[in-house]
Image (tube, grey):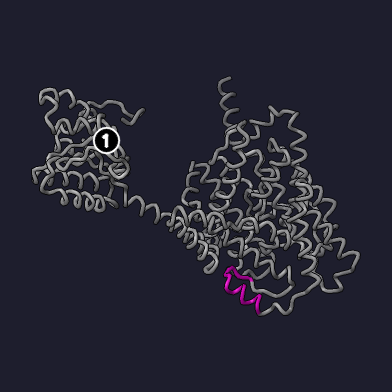
Amino acid sequence: MLTMNKIANTLKQYMPIFDWLPNYNKSNLSGDLSAGLTVGIMLIPQGMAYAMLAGLDPIHGLYAVTVPLLLYAIFGTSRQLAVGPVAMVSLLTASSISTLNPSSPEEYLMLALTLAFLVGLIQFALGLFRFGFVVNFLSHPVINGFTSAAAIIIGLSQVKHLFRIKLPRTEHIQDTVVAIAQNISDIHWITFGIGIVGIIIIKYGKKIHKSLPTPLIAVVFGILAVTFLNLTESGVKVLGDVPSGLPTLSSPSFDMSVWSTLLPIALTISLVGFAESYAVAKTIHGKHKNYKLDANQELIGLGMANFGAAFFKGYPVTGGFSRTAVNDQAGAKTALASIISVVLIVLTLLFFTGLFYNLPNAILAAVVLVAVSGLIDFKTPKTLWKNDKMDFLMLMATFIATLTLGIETGIISGMILSLLAVIYKASRPHIAILAKVPGTKYYRNVERFTNLEKRDDVVVIRIDGPIYFANVDFIKKKIDRLVLSKKNTLRTIVLNMESVTSLDSSGAHELDEWIRMWKTAGLNTSISGTRGPIRDILHTWGIIHSIGADHVFTDDATAVDFFDNKINPESIQELSPYALQSEKKFDESSTGH
């Protein structure tokens, strides 16, 4: 019985469908049905439009929302996330594959399948080995700058379908803008008119009623306009034949040279796709507290979805902002909504693909343009400019790099900037000078509080952060300047280490040197407020011995009272066990103190 329970729990952990499906509440069916049909209708034009953006035939966009969406419903933890092609991943797919100059549509498709497989492999491995935290390397300003720039690049890439002009396949904004300027005189006004009407329908149709499937209405308008006005003879480009039937098995390439070429962009898609997906899943999860959202299992779910895309003629997929919001608003309570969307797409593939023959490319361009317009964020840069200049600079640097140097270079630049910002901040920890609050035993920052009891003969220094190789020089210089400014009056230094979270060998060596140097200069030196793990390190490196166990205190007030001879020297022995705690092998793992 115990073994069966263990198997059941394991299945629920790695296949969350076994958690919610056996206990499915029939009262959720109407919401799931409504959401599934709504998102399914939305996926039809979006899938085809994003596939074209990725450089593939539109049918592969529909393939990408069958098996992949079903696999996510089985393995994902979010019950509202709508997985499928998204604009940014589609652009990343196109930009990476185009650099390989595939010789035929078949080779292009094979590379797209391989990219999906690599994305699935990376995400699955990251989830399996509990590396969901890697998304933290993409800070919010970096993602914001990258997303806004990518949205502009995506929007400009659709101008060729909206204007029906020739544009080069490029991800550099300067090349696209120059090409548009050179070819603007060739604009096809009927195509442009259809596209503009499509944009108006999609963008403003929701104001009539928020549940209106405006992308599908735009598709129906485009098909009817072309069919009844015979606009193909006037030069309007349409989809043409869309194959019917379900996707057959496909196989990605296992050529290591192809893998090595696609791996950088696969890693980018894996991280950016997961960041986008998990962000929207977490936002929606805030409204639904009846299930647990697991970052690592989300990686596994997205990995499985991309495996499905690789073996069933799709291309890389992730969770989409707009579709997930619509899914939630339409009443989705469980992943059954996604399964219903899959059923609708399957029926479309089997029986209705012929209806899309006269669908104008300009309508699909309108679908993409409206979708990405919401990704350009003007509010965040303004907020960061007012509140955090460093994050603003990171956002703008990523934004400009993505626009001018390309998608891959932009996101890699952003990741490097994020890491450099972390290193910079960690290398310059906050250092506070403390003084006593009158009538109490509490010590506070002199820069933040007034009327503190400041003394020229005592300085209490609090280091807020780790002490390690990258910041010891910065800390030493600040303390040296402080000590030098009080050299004629200073008699004792108290190092408050309550906020020191870690201490490496370089930090320990320098700390020992400081203590010895101050002692040589005749300064009484004490340490206060250390946590258990830090005391362990102080013992390991002999610093407790250097400073003396009777100079390690629980708080600043005791350290200063000891210097002022307010504590009987004999009774100081009672305080020594605090410093010697590590030597007695006390178990501090539960509290850290």
Picture quarter with the N terminus: top right
Residue sitting at x 69%, y 52%: 64
* Rendering quarter of residue 201: bottom right
Q: Is residue 109 magenta?
A: no
Picture quarter with the C terminus: top left
Q: Is residue 216 visible?
A: yes
Q: Say what amino acid the circle numbered 1 marks.
A: Tyr
Q: Is residue 177 magenta?
A: yes
Q: Is residue 432 left or right of residue 302?
A: left
**Boundaries of the magenta span:** 169-181
Q: Position of residue 455 (x, y in %)?
A: 18, 40
* The residue positioned farthest toward the top in the image shown: 1
* The residue positioned farthest toward the front in the image shown: 451
Considering depth in this image, is 136 or 90 the residue closer to the camera?
136
Q: Is residue 345 visible?
A: no
Q: Which residue is mark 1?
A: 443
Q: Position of residue 409 (x, y in %)?
A: 50, 64
Residue sitting at x 58%, y 52%: 273
Considering depth in this image, is 450 or 245 the residue closer to the camera?
450
Q: Position of residue 328 (x, y in %)?
A: 69, 41
Q: Is residue 447 left or right of residue 550?
A: right
Q: How many marks?
A: 1
Q: Residues within 10 Å of mark 1 (few under 14, many from 20)?
A: some
Vertical comparison of 253 with 532: above or below: below
Q: Position of residue 83 (x, y in %)?
A: 66, 47
The dominant secondary structure in magenta is: helix
Q: Is residue 413 left or right of residue 83?
A: left
* The residue positioned farthest toward the right in the image shown: 228
* Rendering quarter of residue 61: bottom right
